[in-house]
Image (spheres, rainbow, N blue to C red):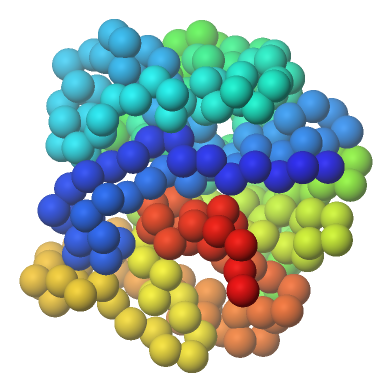
Amino acid sequence: MRVHHLNCGTINTFGGVAMIGAARGVTHCILIETNDGLLLVDTGSGTRDYIAPTFLMRLFLTMSGSPRDLEETAISQIKQLGYAPEDVKHIVLTHFHYDHVGGLPDFPQAKVHIYKDEYEAVTRPQDMYERYPYRAEHWAHGPDWVAHSLQGDRWFGFECTPPVNLGPVEFRLVPLPGHTRGHSGVALHLPGGGWLLHCGDAYTFHGDVDPQNPRHPPYYRLFRPYFHLNKAFRQIGKHSPRLRALLREHGDEVTLTCSHDPRELDKFLIPQS
């Protein structure tokens, strides 16, 4: 069984310095071999986003400083690894924002797993904040949705959906709302590797979840008034203490990562001394 950590969308924004502590960000997706084909956690931006973007997608990509590099798309990297797009049987999403789901049309045959609250936010948006960041063209092909609900299960004290077993690989969705209504982490149990929790956008800077030395990005204070006034950011802020506690108590069993901090991706790509 092999696990591949991919950057499926570089971002370059000034605001990123305040959010992730770096001018250049990534979109960290995970590709895993299972007994039932390939499993992909988030897709990053897709082929159509770069070749034939809608007006709003072009605006989003421009604002994020995307280089629109087709070689960064998940489908391109999967082909470079020697797989076929049809080998992707399962896609597990942290949430429905365009930079996490844009590649869905590149894998029309895959089952798409999502937390029920996020699926409802997309199908029945409550306000403009749920309506505009979600782009219907990303699921116009009619994916094979699998919406997961809470049924009383727990994962290291966190609420979670029931486990899905794909041979030696198991995953659960761990609700971490705030960034979106149904935003979730994806908890992956990998043979011989313990647990990996992909937290999506529940945190954006590695220092936020450092159990020994928690800290904010260098320019965070410039944006702090906005973060404190914004309801979503206040809710997101509640996750970091719990995630730090998780690492303090179970750091030998659990590894965390997030979507956009390049250092969180690099720790899987650069051999550790």
Q: Position of residue 228 (x, y in %)?
A: 19, 72
Image quarter (top left, top right, bottom left or bottom right) of the C terminus: bottom right
Residue at the farthest bottom position: 212
Q: Examine the image and state in which quarter residue 195 appears.
A: bottom right
Q: Nearer the viewer, residue 36 or 7?
A: 7
Q: Is residue 12 above or below residue 82?
A: below
Q: Position of residue 217 (x, y in %)?
A: 26, 72
Q: Residue at x 26, y 14 (%)?
A: 53
Residue 19 appears in the figure: no
Image quarter (top left, top right, bottom left or bottom right) of the N terminus: top right
Residue at the farthest front position: 273
Q: Is residue 150 above or below residue 101?
A: below
Q: Is residue 143 above or below residue 67?
A: above
Residue 251 appears in the figure: yes
Q: Position of residue 224 (x, y in %)?
A: 15, 73
Q: Position of residue 216 (x, y in %)?
A: 28, 77
Q: Residue at x 57, y 65 (%)?
A: 256
In the picture, measured across the screen, residue 199 lies left or right of residue 156, that is left
In the picture, measured across the screen, residue 163 lies left or right of residue 66, that is right
In the picture, measured across the screen, residue 218 lies left or right of residue 94, that is left
Q: Nearer the viewer, residue 84 or 230?
A: 84
Q: Examine the image and state in which quarter residue 238 appears.
A: bottom left
Q: Residue at x 78, y 62 (%)?
A: 193
In the picture, measured across the screen, residue 193 lies left or right of residue 230, that is right
Q: Residue at x 31, y 18 (%)?
A: 50
Q: Is residue 65 above or below residue 89?
A: below
Q: Examine the image and state in which quarter residue 83 appears.
A: top right
Query: How many dots with numbers?
Result: 0
